Image: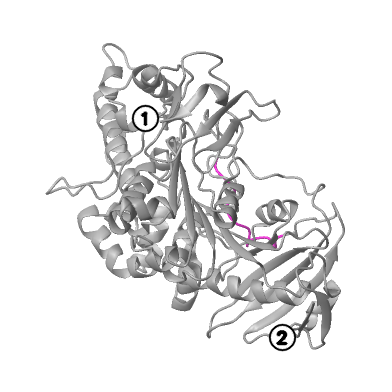
């Protein structure tokens, strides 16, 4: 059987279902599509890809300091398969690299890349997400997709350079591109490029992202339910107006009275106290709190009884710690606006409660909410500024709609994950959203379409003492294509430069991994989801 296609100005005959290129890569320079300009189409030999040199002054901000295992507290852009992305491209097979600029509206300049395996394509597409303010192509995540046989695609979301968010000033269309339009335009264009190269459209299309990428994932599900068949949303920064409000508030209360500031030298004592209170609640002492929701930890146990030192907290520091755990609340009603961090996250508290306020929170209110480059955190008022953020940026950026029926009715599957020790985005926000979807769809229907995996001991997208290495894409691939819902996901922990030292099953929320009572506690076979 023959398929006849057009897309690059010529007719090409290919066998239906072919997993190899139908046309030369370079011929895609002639690919024609409305509002799409191809800027590159070139073959990259196996192991020969080198990330382009980014012009000085346009590079995204560097990642924060590493955690104890050497994994970035906030992983490089495109992390999302669990564990830090690879840094070498030597094992990437040959692929056709296509770059394009999309201009769906005036003042839009969305750059995308599509990486197409030269041979061995699995017939599927994996779109990958970004981090923070984006501003660059996620090369590492594209390489991971190609290694696994997928045609990969990524976007810079419509601007160059990650921080600060000055790209938003006077450019409302670029804000929309960043908020949701770029991922949709990328998906539509990438599918057309894939069809032009292989002679067939992808059989299945997936999206995989963490942090900002997690928000992009949920935004796609809610706004464009036909774009992807399966979506992986890790540590989603989905409730932007409240999340960035909590980030700004935490920075503010940390330095409102400098006597309450907790220096990083005290984090080990705080973490040790949390572990002492909660680590063994699951019957296993492994420096990991399996389920922080049942943990009752009051930082007052560290109150200094004599001279202040790194092993105790002063009274003002105890109060700051309590607020970091509680999250921002309405000062009048006491109602929670955004949940706080969990016991076990203390190692990464410099993200929100460090020497300087987290830039993302400040920039959101400076450039997007108030649109005033002179605005400072000293002016922040949680009771008024967060409702203002809901009104101004919420309709664009918040991805909190629990009605996923348009997505699930067409067979779409959503797999969410979040590290319980995340020091940047409260893990309970994912729990709250998941529960709102279950309430909306009903437990039975929701279980057929959405699963949430909370990862004990994992930081923001990766890192920490928990089993942070797992393949969520493989899990959702099986779910979409074979109808096999993930009742657990195999996960492991591997210190940088070392061998795997622990395996554990990740369990669908609200289940947790329960030790069977015998055998090594470092082996997944000795645990069951219950």
Q: Residue furthest left?
A: 332
Q: Quadrant of residue 251?
A: top left
Q: Is residue 81 left or right of residue 176?
A: right
Snapshot quadrant of residue 418: top left
Give residue 414's mark: none
Q: Which residues are magenta?
A: 54-64
The crowd level at tag 1 (other Cα within 10 Å; few <14, some 14-19, many 20+) is many
Percent position of residue 324, x then y: 31, 37
The residue that mark 2 highlights is: 32
Residue displayed at 53% across by 28% down: 465
At 83% from the left edge and 60% from the top edge, which residue is drawn?
119
Secondary structure that dominates the magenta span:
loop
Taking the view exactly as shown, the residue that stands out farthest to the front is 1
Is residue 77 visible to us here?
no
Mark 2 touches mark 1? (CB < 8 Å): no
User: Is residue 12 rendered magenta in the image?
Assistant: no
Query: Could you say which is closer to the camera, residue 495 or residue 403?
Result: 403
- In the rendered image, which residue does mark 1 sit on? 343
Q: Nearer the viewer, residue 348 or 167?
A: 348
**Nearer the observer, disc 2 or disc 1?**
2
């Amino acid at each position: 059987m023959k398929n006849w296609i057009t897309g690059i100005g010529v007719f090409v005959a290919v066998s239906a279902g072919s997993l190899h290129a139908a046309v030369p890569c370079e011929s895609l320079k002639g690919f024609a599509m409305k509002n799409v300009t191809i800027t590159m189409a070139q073959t990259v030999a196996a192991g020969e890809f080198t990330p382009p040199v980014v012009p000085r002054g346009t590079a995204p901000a560097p990642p924060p300091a590493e955690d104890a295992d050497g994994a970035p507290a906030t992983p490089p852009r495109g992390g999302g398969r669990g564990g830090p992305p690879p840094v070498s491209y030597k094992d990437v097979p040959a692929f056709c690299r296509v770059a394009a600029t999309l201009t769906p509206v005036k003042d839009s300049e969305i750059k995308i890349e599509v990486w197409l395996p030269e041979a061995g394509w699995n017939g599927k597409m994996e779109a990958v997400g970004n981090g923070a303010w984006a501003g660059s192509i996620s090369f590492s995540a594209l390489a991971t997709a190609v290694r696994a046989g997928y045609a990969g695609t990524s976007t810079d979301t419509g601007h160059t350079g990650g921080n600060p968010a000055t790209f938003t000033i006077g450019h409302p269309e670029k804000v929309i591109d960043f908020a949701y339009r770029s991922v949709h335009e990328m998906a539509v264009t990438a599918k057309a490029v894939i069809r032009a190269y292989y002679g067939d459209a992808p059989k299945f299309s997936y999206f995989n992202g963490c942090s900002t990428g997690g928000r992009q994932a949920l935004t796609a599900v809610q706004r464009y339910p036909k774009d992807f068949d399966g979506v992986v949303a890790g540590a989603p920064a989905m409730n932007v107006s409240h999340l960035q409000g909590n980030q700004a508030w935490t920075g503010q209360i940390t330095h409102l009275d400098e006597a309450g500031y907790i220096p990083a030298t005290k984090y080990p004592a705080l973490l040790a106290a949390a572990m002492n209170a909660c680590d063994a609640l699951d019957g296993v002492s492994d420096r990991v709190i399996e389920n922080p929701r049942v943990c009752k930890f009051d930082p007052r146990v560290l109150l200094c009884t004599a001279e202040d030192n790194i092993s105790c907290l002063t009274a003002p520091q105890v109060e700051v710690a309590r607020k970091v755990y509680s999250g921002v609340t309405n000062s009048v009603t006491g109602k929670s606006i955004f949940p706080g961090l969990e016991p076990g996250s203390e190692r990464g508290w410099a993200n929100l409660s460090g020497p300087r306020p987290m830039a993302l929170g400040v920039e959101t209110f400076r450039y997007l909410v108030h649109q005033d480059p002179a605005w400072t955190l000293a002016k922040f008022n949680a009771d008024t500024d967060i409702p203002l953020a809901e009104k101004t940026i919420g309709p664009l950026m918040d991805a909190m709609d629990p009605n996923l029926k348009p997505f699930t009715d067409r067979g779409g599957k959503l797999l969410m994950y979040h590290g319980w020790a995340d020091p940047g985005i409260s893990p309970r926000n994912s729990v709250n959203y998941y529960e709102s979807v279950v309430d909306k769809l009903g437990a039975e229907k929701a279980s057929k379409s959405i699963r949430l995996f909370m990862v004990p001991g994992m930081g923001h997208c990766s890192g920490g003492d928990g089993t942070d290495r797992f393949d969520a894409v493989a899990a959702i691939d099986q779910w979409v294509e074979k109808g096999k819902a993930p009742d657990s996901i195999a996960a492991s922990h591997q210190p940088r430069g070392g061998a795997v030292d622990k395996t554990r099953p990740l369990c669908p929320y609200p289940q947790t991994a329960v030790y069977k009572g015998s055998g090594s506690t470092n082996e997944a076979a000795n645990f069951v989801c219950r």
